[in-house]
Structure formats: C-alpha cells, structure tokens
C-alpha cells in the first residue's frame, strides 16, 4: 500500500521555501507553453470558425488559397447559371465573385506598416456570410469607393474609424462601417464592392467565387459537377472545409511553442530534481524509518515520484493561472496563407490547460526519478543513523 | 511447561568491511530470548549491541550463523519478504523517536497499519487503542513538534505496539529523555513485557535504564559476557 497522499502534500507545504522556486520555475514554463499554444489555438479557431456549411468556395485548380487563385469572367458566366446554385426572390444566383487584394497601410501609433487583406465582393456576398455583422456605420454602396473594416482590424490600424479615409492604388477609400466576424478569418479583412475593387486595383480576374447551393444534395452535385467539367480549371469545396484547411500559419507557432517548452522544461526538470534531491537528503532518517516499519523500496520510490509530480502540478496550476489573463486578448500576425495581417485571440481552452498540467506533471515525474531511486536504495541502517 | 524462545541465535557472526580490513562486529554469539522477557543489551560503543539488535529485528543480515525469530530464519527472507516480516513481527523504538514530522501522533501510529489488510475504521480503533495504552489518546491530533520528548517517545511506543508484534526492539529509547520521561517510557516497556508478554530487547548505555530489564547481557568486542539475571 502506498503512503497516504497527505504525507506528500504536507511535505511539500512544510518545505515551502525550498519548493517555491521549483513551483515558480515550472509555473513559468507552463505559462509560456500554454500562451504560445493558445496563440496557435486562437489562429486555428479563427480559420476553423469561418464559413457557412451551405456555401461552396470555387478557386483555381492547384491553388491552396484564394490569394493564389484566379477565376476568369468567362468561367463566372458559365458557372452562375448552374441549377445547383440557389437563387434569391428576384431569381438572381446567390453567388459572390470576390477579388482579394493586399494593400499596405500604416498601423496605429506609428507602429510601422502592414499588409491588409481587402475583399471586393458582390452585393450578395454579405448575406452569403451571415456570421459577419455590421457593428457600426453602414455597409458600402456598390459603385462607390467605400469600405467596411473589421472592428478588430480597426483597433490595430490607423484611419480605420468610421469617417476616416486612406489612399491605396492612387485612390482614396472612405471607411463607412465596421463589422464583426465573430472571431472568424473575416475579422482580418476589409470589405468593399467587388467591381469597384477590380477597377481601382486593375484586376482582370476574380480570386474566388462563393456560391450558396440549393441544398445538401445540390452542394454535393455542384462540387461533383465542377470536378467533372474538364473545361473548367477550377475546383469547388465547402467553404467551412476551405477555411479549416487554412491553418498553416499556426504551424510555426506550434513548433516554436514546442521548442521553447522543451528547452525550458529541461531547466524545470533540473529544478525539480534539485528540490527533490534536497528533500530526500533532509528526510534520510525518515525514509529509513519507513523502510524499517515495513514500507518497501518501490513504495518509497513511488512516494517521492508522486511528491515531485504534485510539486510540479502545483507549478502547472500556477502557470495556467498566470496565463489566464491573456485569454481573449487580441493580437495579430502575418498570415502565411494571405501574407496579410491576421487578427486572432489567445484562446486558453480547458484542453490546453489540461495539456499544460499534464506537461507539468511530466516535468515533475522526470525530475524526481533519480532522487526517488536514491531514496529507495538508501541503506536502512545508515539512513537511520543520519541526523 | 517449557520456556518458549522467541529469539534463538546460534554462532552469529557479523563482519563489516572497512576499506581493506574486515571488522568483526559480532563473533559467534549464541543466545536465546524467551517470550515476555525484557532484555537489556549493554556494552561500550562498538561492542556490537546495535548490530545484534538490527539482525534480530531483520534490518541487517548476519555474515554467518543463524538468527531465528519465532522459528523463522530471518536471514533467509528476501528484501521485500523481510519488509513484510518486520511490519508483522517487530515494533521499533528509536533513540530519536523517528516520528514523521508532517504526520499527527494518530497518523504516525496508524502508519504501520497501512501495510495490513485492516480497513480504515479498524485502523482507527487500533491506533487510538495504542495511543490510549501509552496515555496519549488526548494528543492524537498533535504533530510531533507539539509534543514533549517523553510524549514523542510514547507515541513511538504506540506505533511499535499497534500491529501487536511479538517483539519490540528499542535502541537507546531513553537516550534523549530527561529522567522522569525516561522512567515513564521504561515503565511502559516493562509493563509490556510483564502484562502483555511482549519480548522487549533494549540497547542501552544507561545502567538505570537497564535496571528495568528482567535480564541484562553485556557485549564486548562482539562477544557476550556472562549473563546477569535480574528478575524472573
């Protein structure tokens, strides 16, 4: 039978000065791990949260993202009359031919410049994306040089308040509204009229088409039809699937997070090891007594490992608490899909916190293995004689 | 009725290796200790008395010879069998009490019972009974730091008693106590041998402590000197 867990808990508390450094060390590692991973989660959530399951995105065959895709006007004319595409009351196809343009704009507070993704859309492009809502001002008027910016982008870029204007492509664009994409990829976009965008930025082609299928069967049929039509060098896929696949940007952050955590955890393992060695050394006679009373070597081994694990778990919990204030904090990075500023939030999910805690326990267990082995192998008589 | 020997030692030798030299701690000792005896082992430092105690208690192993406790040749047991055997058959009392500082008196006494099949309630009853026997039931929830030296040693005796072992070994149990506390502790050990028929083996330097024993044996240079019988 194992020693009571209260024995471990009280030993940790009793040596609180010695254990505090280790707890804080592990806390720091876990906080960094959780924060970096929460960036990746935030990024993935932002793209994974985007799109309407009823929509189909059409891009050039071979293009992995809209930014590298081209759809010609001839292709648009061919596709828009297909029966699988839903129509509005007036009989117009629910189809938005989008143009994506990157423009360079100044950030707030003279914080340099960054690329912003401008999406020129057809008028129907707004109702096709119901998760995007207007939170201030009004939508742009087709044919006018007006834009609606994401509220989150507005917090990061100069001249994005309603009524402000900025220059691009030699023309001045006026901000007439702000929108909210409910933490989706649209939170990193500026929207304007598609035809106006093609005119200002001199684009012959569209970047992508977004269509609403008549129903589930229609959507499947539409995708199949696009695939089967050899005249069309385009491919169709569900809008949600398209965005869910756009998680490449999160990869380097994940890798960086894992590298950082691994490097730091080596330090934390040694800190835990040091503490547990000191703890074992100061309890030599106690361990000898336990052995004499009948506790086996493996019980002592397990006891020290549990204690190390608990110590680190305490650090892990503190680390998660330290990282929590960053939850929901909005930040931005350059997207590797669009090469523009992508706005997303630190997302500290329960799963991520659990990962952080598990990580801390691993640090503690690894760190206490050698001290535990030493404790379990102490010669009983010598241990009893120790001061 | 023949006397039942709890401990039976024959030609026991223990050699320690110190660098290149073998040091003889015990040299061919033979000894019988009957049930209910309170035996005091005396002798100068290095005479081998603690080594003899450790071998009888299954903490150390002899180099040669036989040490049977209740018929069991202790040296034949494996490390883990020995751990179980100690838990079931031997109660330990140390000079420095060796209580676990983070556990209360009750939890310290309950500790050996965690290795038995007793359930929580049975363990509680038994631990409280043992504490009551040493007159410390009202100190059950005190930590060792909140107890006097004498009280700590009484808790240690309760811990030694709690599994109801046949044998209680005490290594200088009064070495860290004032004379009043020492007398109390020795009185308890004496009562255990007389009324509960526990076999108590005590190592001591102190003739006053040895005076409580029913038999005193002296060791010198690893050998037994002629026995001095105190009380039947």
Image (cartoon, coloured by chain):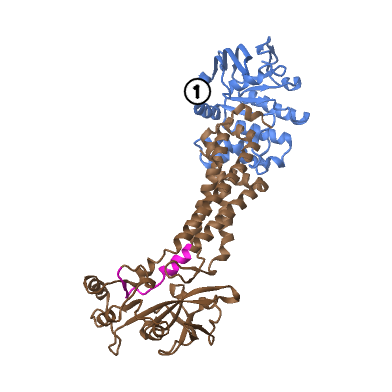
Chain colours: A brown, B blue
Q: Position of residue A343 (x, y in %)?
A: 49, 71
Between residues A184 and B151, which one lies in front from this camera angle? A184
Between residues A184 and A68, which one lies in front from this camera angle? A68
Q: Is residue A201 left or right of residue B16?
A: left
Quadrant in the rendering for residue B28: top right
From this view, report whether residue A228 is shown above or below residue A250. Answer: below
Which residue is found at the position 51% from the left and 55% from the top? A356
Look at the image and tell me whether residue B123 can be seen: yes
Q: Which residue is mark 1?
A: B77
Q: Position of residue A156 (x, y in %)?
A: 55, 75
Residue A1 on the magenta span: no
Q: Residue furthest right?
A: B179
Q: Position of residue B98 (x, y in %)?
A: 66, 33
Which residue is found at the position 57% from the left and 56% from the top? A319
Q: Residue furthest top?
A: B226
Q: Position of residue B99 (x, y in %)?
A: 65, 36
Q: How many numbered discs?
A: 1
Query: To which chain does the residue with label 1 belong?
Result: B
Between residues B195 and B96, which one lies in front from this camera angle? B96
Q: Which SS class for mark 1?
A: loop
Q: Which residues are magenta?
A: A40-61
Residue A50 on the magenta span: yes
Look at the image and tell me whether residue B3 can be seen: no
Q: Residues within 10 Å of mark 1 (few under 14, many from 20)?
A: some
From this view, report whether residue A88 is shown above or below residue B83. Answer: below
In which quadrant will I find the C terminus of chain A?
Answer: top right
Q: Is residue B10 left or right of residue A249?
A: right
Which residue is found at the position 62% from the left and 11% from the top? B27
From this view, report whether residue A279 is shown above or below residue A150. Answer: above
């Amino acid at each position: 039978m194992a020693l009571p867990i209260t024995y471990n808990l009280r030993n940790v508390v009793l040596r609180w000065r010695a254990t505090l450094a280790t707890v804080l060390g592990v806390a720091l590692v876990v906080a960094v791990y959780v924060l970096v991973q929460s960036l990746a989660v935030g990024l993935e959530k932002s793209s994974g949260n985007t799109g309407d399951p009823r929509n189909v995105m059409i891009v050039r065959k071979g293009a992995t993202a809209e930014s590298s895709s081209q759809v010609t006007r001839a292709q648009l004319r061919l596709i828009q009359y297909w029966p699988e595409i839903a129509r509005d009351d007036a009989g117009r196809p629910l189809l938005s031919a989008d143009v994506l343009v990157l423009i360079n704009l100044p950030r707030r507070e003279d914080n340099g410049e960054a690329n912003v993704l401008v999406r020129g859309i057809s008028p129907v492009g707004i109702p096709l994306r119901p998760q995007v809502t207007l939170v201030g001002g009004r939508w742009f008027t087709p044919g006018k040089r007006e834009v609606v910016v994401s509220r989150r982008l507005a917090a990061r870029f100069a001249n994005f308040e309603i009524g402000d204007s900025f220059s691009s492509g030699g023309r001045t664009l006026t901000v007439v509204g702000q929108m909210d994409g409910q933490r989706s990829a649209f939170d990193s976009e500026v929207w304007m009229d598609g035809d106006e965008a093609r005119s200002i930025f001199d684009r012959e082609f569209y970047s992508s088409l977004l269509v609403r299928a008549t129903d589930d069967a229609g959507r499947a049929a539409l995708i199949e039809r696009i695939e089967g039509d050899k005249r069309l060098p385009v491919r169709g896929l569900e809008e949600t699937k398209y965005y869910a696949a756009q998680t490449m940007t999160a990869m380097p952050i994940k890798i960086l997070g894992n590298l950082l955590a691994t490097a730091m955890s080596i330090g934390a393992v040694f800190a835990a090891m040091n503490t547990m060695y000191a703890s074992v050394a100061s309890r030599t006679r106690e361990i000898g007594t336990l052995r004499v009373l009948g506790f086996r070597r493996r019980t002592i081994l397990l006891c020290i490992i549990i204690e190390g694990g608990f110590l680190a778990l305490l650090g892990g919990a503190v680390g998660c608490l330290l990282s929590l204030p960053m939850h929901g904090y909005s930040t931005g990075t350059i997207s590797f899909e669009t090469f523009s500023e992508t706005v997303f939030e630190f997302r500290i999910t329960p799963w991520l916190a659990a990962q952080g805690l598990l990580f801390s326990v691993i640090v503690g267990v690894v760190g206490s293995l050698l001290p535990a082995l030493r404790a379990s192998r102490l010669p009983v008589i010598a241990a009893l004689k120790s001061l | 009725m023949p006397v039942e020997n709890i401990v039976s030692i024959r030609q026991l030798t223990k050699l320690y290796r110190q660098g290149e030299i073998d040091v003889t701690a015990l040299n061919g000792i033979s000894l019988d200790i009957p049930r209910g005896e309170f035996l005091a082992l005396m002798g100068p430092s290095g005479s081998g008395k603690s080594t003899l105690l450790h071998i009888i208690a299954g903490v150390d192993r002899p180099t040669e010879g036989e040490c049977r406790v209740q018929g069991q040749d202790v040296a034949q047991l494996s490390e883990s069998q020995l751990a179980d055997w100690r838990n079931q058959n031997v109660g330990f009392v140390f000079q420095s009490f060796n209580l676990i500082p983070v556990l209360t008196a009750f939890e310290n006494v309950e500790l050996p019972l965690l290795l038995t099949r007793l359930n929580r309630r049975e363990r509680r009853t038994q631990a409280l009974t043992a504490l009551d026997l040493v007159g410390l039931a009202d100190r059950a929830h005190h930590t060792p730091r909140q107890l006097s030296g004498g009280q700590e040693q009484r808790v240690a005796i309760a811990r030694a008693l709690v599994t109801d072992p046949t044998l209680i070994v005490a290594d200088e149990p009064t070495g860290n106590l004032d004379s009043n506390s020492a007398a109390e502790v020795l009185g308890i050990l004496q009562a255990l041998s007389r009324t509960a028929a526990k076999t108590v083996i005590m190592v001591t330097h102190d003739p006053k402590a040895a005076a409580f024993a029913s038999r005193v044996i002296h060791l010198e240079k690893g050998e037994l000197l002629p026995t001095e019988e105190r009380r039947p």
